[in-house]
Amino acid sequence: MGFVKEFKEFAFKGNVLDLAVGVIIGAAFGKIVSSLVEDVITPLILNPALKAAGAENIAKLTWNGVAYGNFLSAIISFLCIAMVLFWIIKGANKINKKEAPAPAGPTDDQKLLAEIRDLLKSRSNI
């Protein structure tokens, strides 16, 4: 099998293309979430909370040369992004929630078997 033919079979399999589309959409969605956190959540909620706590420049906090402020900033950023993703996924799940179908009644065979069972029970009681 030639290299080109082998590569073509690999590259154009359905799951490879689906994965590529997922990665591209995931990257675009990541930009949306990052912008929401950096441009909306942080200025509205996080900055006032940090000012109230007296830690306006959290990224510049150091102790004996250890820049633990950057680490704290990364943790806070992660928690904000995780919370926003949780809200988005929860909302999407609410929208896409399908009602469970009502359980189907007994089939004709099941009804017939139930009648036979009942008849056999009534005969054994005689």
Image: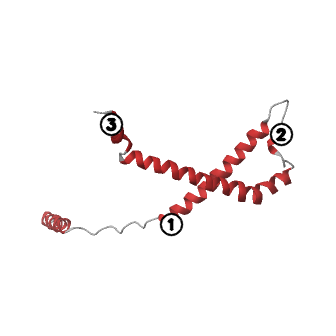
Position of residue 35 in the picture relative to residue 125 (left or right): right
Element under label 1?
A: helix
Residue beneath label 1, please? Answer: 95
Q: Residue at x 44, y 47 (%)?
A: 19
Q: Earlier in the sequence, mark 1 or mark 2?
A: 2
| Residue 61: mark in rendering | 2
Element under label 3?
A: helix
Residue closest to the eye, 60 or 91 = 60
Residue 39 point in image, percent of width and height: 72, 57
Vertical position of residue 10 compared to residue 113: above or below: above
Q: How many marks?
A: 3
Q: Distance of mark 2 from mark 3, alpha carbons? A: 55 Å
Vertical position of residue 1 compared to residue 56: above or below: above
**Amino acid type indicated by mark 2:** Leu
Position of residue 50 in the picture relative to residue 28 (left or right): right
Residue beneath label 3, please? Answer: 6
